[in-house]
Amino acid sequence: MFAIALPDDADEVAFRNAARSCIARGLAPADVAFVSPDQPSLLPALPAEAPDGSNLAINVPRSFADLMRDAVCHSAADRFALLYDVLWRILRGEHDLAERASDPRVAQLMDYRHAVRRDIHKMHAFLRFRERSIDGHAVYTAWFEPHHHILRRATPFFVDRFTNMDFVIATPRGTAIWQGGQLSFGAPAARQAAGEPDDVLDGLWLTYFRTTFNPARLRTRTMVNHMPLAYWNNMPETALIPGMVMNAVSRVSGMMDMDADQPSLFADRIADRKTSGPIADAHAAGSLEAMHRDAQGCTRCPLYRNATQTVFGEGPRDAPVVFVGEQPGDQEDLAGRPFVGPAGQLFDRALAEASLDRSRAYVTNAVKHFKYEPRGKRRIHKRPDAGEVQACRWWLEGEIAAIRPALVVALGATAAQALARRPVAVTKLRGPYDFSGQRGFITVHPSFLLRISHDPGDALATREYGAFVRDLMQIGELVPALRA
Ligand code: URA
């Protein structure tokens, strides 16, 4: 039996060379022990002189090459022996062995592959560079503590992205240095080698992290699963997380109460200009159908320019209840009908649970055109500003005047603001409300419930959804004609 010395961070090339040398000598797995070069061994080392055939080409199936590439990076001491065993059997005719998860050795290697890939992913996601000046030259340094020997595998990702910056990634298992377009690997580093924090860079990153944190999307358990606590030490932003988690609930209430944005420049003048002319005449005539038709040509605010069409309200002209949302979303804009997208589906589900019949209600929006920001191929909803809400109130008031419902329900802050003509805090005023003589009701917007519900069984989402259904049931009690 021979000892084969392979360094801890041996990659697939080093393993392949060692394996080739053993195979050329006809050494079966039981004849070799893979040891670390620093480990004293009583076994003889392989003779230095190369046997015939030591440079023989070994053709292995792609499935084995893929498995080897990752599994060889695992930190388990038996990885080389397992790989050699599987390789030996493949070369003896078990060609598809590396795909056979039922084989205990292959299954073990597949587990190693999974762990290594996960470690690489974590390094790509959680490594943070800090700028240092060395001899007046900017060098970016990072400290990371991987679980496996992944430095060689994970570093090309950073080279591709930061080709023009010199960097050092220090880990307890080795160091990667990218300098002047050359990549080299060195000895393990002590933690301090990664350098002191850079206040400016850290400050910028923390500001970015803080402003992009959405408390309504907070899922603590998922966050900790994805960003295990073991990595937090090296990530400056994690110091902010406990405080942000503590404040998340109150910030979500604040979001629910938030007013529409500030009016755009000249919004008042645009609105004034539009209160006369043929549209005004249709409005005065009080005909829902005429208003619906005329609204198709509405140019009262600039939103018509980018929207596909006006999305007017729909429902019976004598509906006992008018539900008012914010503005059409992406799907409503394409369909030309309110509340048909994801928020509409949630709304339908809640109405059904509250035993209310949507077909007996009139459903509309405070703003009739979709406001969005293009992002790649997607159109991202953008809150209408107060000027746009004001300009569109013309249509909303026309709809209500024509229908004369027993109750008008504001879904969310924008609708409440449009109806009350002033900013309204939904959490404070939730429930029955008098909109200047019109009997009304204020509740949350279904999109808010969608924003907070990501994990099934999420406590906040379940609680808020339940409260919304209870609001709808109360509406059913106020206006029994709406009940299914
Ligand atoms: N959100 C709204 O406020 N209205 C819709 O029609 C759809 C989503």
Image (tube, grey):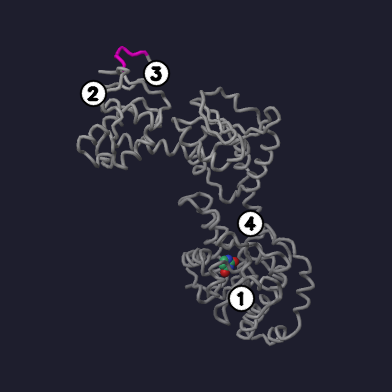
Q: Residues within 10 Å of mark 3 (few under 14, many from 20)?
A: few
Give the Cα separation between the discs numbered 4 and 2: 68 Å
Instruction: Place residue 369 in its image quadrant.
Output: bottom right
At label 3, the amino acid type is: Pro
Magenta region's main secondary structure?
A: loop
Give the Cα separation between the discs numbered 3 and 1: 74 Å
Dot 4 and dot 2 residues touching (CB under 8 Å): no
Nearer the N terminus, badge 1 or badge 4?
Answer: 4
Nearer the N terminus, badge 4 or badge 2?
Answer: 2
Q: In the rendered image, which residue does mark 4 sit on?
A: 256
Towards the viewer: 179 or 51: 51
Ligand 1 placement by image quarter: bottom right
Q: Is residue 69 left or right of residue 390?
A: left
* Res. 310 mark: 1
In percent of width and height, residue 218 lies at 56, 47
Nearer the N terminus, badge 2 or badge 1?
Answer: 2
Residue at image location 61% in from the left, 41% down from the top: 246
Of the 4 image quadrants, the one containing the N terminus is top left
Observer-side mark, 1 or 4, equals 1
* Res. 30 mark: 2
